[in-house]
Image (tube, helix red, strand yellow):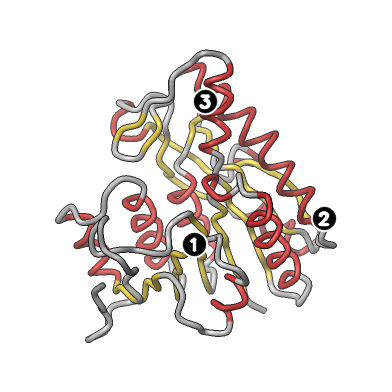
Amino acid sequence: MKKFVVKYGGSIQKDEQTRENLLEEIAYFAKSGDKWAVVHGGGSEISHWLARVGHASDFKNGQRITDELTLAVAEMVLGGRVGKSIMRELEKQGAKAVSISGEDHGLLLATPFDQGIYGHVGEVKAIDTSLITLLWDAGYIPVIAPLGVDEERNVYNINADVAAGHIAGALAADMLILATDVPGVKESPDSLYAIPELTVTAAKQMIKDGRAVGGMIPKLESAIQAMDGGVKIVVIASGKEQGLIDQILRGQRIGTRIVQDKEGSVHHA
């Protein structure tokens, strides 16, 4: 029995067909007896509702600046509208699913990220996976919103990629799949093709030397965190790819695979 964590990016949730295809695959493979968990984003939806109330969205280094109003909207969107809609779609496909948040049962214990310069943005301090395990044992797919709390139960918005990496690592999952809106990790933003495979060391170097930019930084950080926790393989790939999960599970080369260090494992675009 294997354990899989899928980070379902907010950037691909807007396309209805992509959304249905990906969640249908997750529901299908969950019925085989393996354990699946979905960690979802919802940045586009948060920005939409902030705009509806006349509040600008502000980003720095790929991270949303989260003031009081932004946090309130994020909590309502992630813990409510987005999580529940994913849960409903999974159940429509015949799976059992429950929408939860990293706030529940102290799943994600957080502290202010980067000394609080991003507002109510948190970084993961500790994880309690007992709620996930309880749901798995009962046959459910946990659908997890990337929100956390500190020891005083103050709420923090956590980058969904980073949250997924921590959760996958804490669960010692067999695989973490980061389904996003890009075909994988590129050598540079203007490269035509994704790098088929990266070692953990090479991923760290891409962050260090600035080749990884914007939203790719937390994705690589997520992969590194997951593999440090014992995850065997991390795949960063486009969630718009038809049959994405099936291709990955059959070992086909798609997106970028992050693997433990081994000689000759880095292939450049």
What element does badge 3 sit on? loop
Image quadrant for the N terminus? bottom right
| Nearer to us: label 1 or label 2 | 1
Task: Give the amino acid at mark 2.
Answer: Glu
Q: What is the C-alpha distance between the residues marked 1 and 2?
A: 23 Å
Which of these two is toward me, 212 or 144?
212
Q: Which label was assigned to residue 238?
A: 1
Image quadrant for the C terminus? bottom left
What element does badge 2 sit on? helix
Looking at this view, name the residue that lies furthest to the left. 209
Task: Give the amino acid at mark 3.
Answer: Asn
Q: Badge 1: few (under 14), some or many (20 or more) residues near its Cα, within 10 Å?
A: many
User: Where does the image place residue 240, in percent across and percent down from the top left?
Assistant: 56, 60
User: Where does the image place residue 190, in percent across and percent down from the top left?
Assistant: 25, 57
Task: Give the amino acid at mark 1.
Answer: Ser
Mark 3 / mark 2, whichever is N-terminal:
2
Tell me which residue sits at (57%, 53%) in the image: 8
Tell me which residue sits at (31%, 72%) in the image: 195
Q: What is the C-alpha distance between the residues marked 3 and 1?
A: 34 Å
Looking at this view, name the residue that lies furthest to the top. 54
| Nearer to us: label 3 or label 1 | 1
Q: Which label was assigned to residue 154?
A: 3
Q: Is residue 210 left or right of residue 133?
A: left
Which of these two is toward me, 184 or 175?
184
Which of these two is toward me, 134 or 250?
250
What element does badge 1 sit on? strand
| Nearer to us: label 3 or label 2 | 2
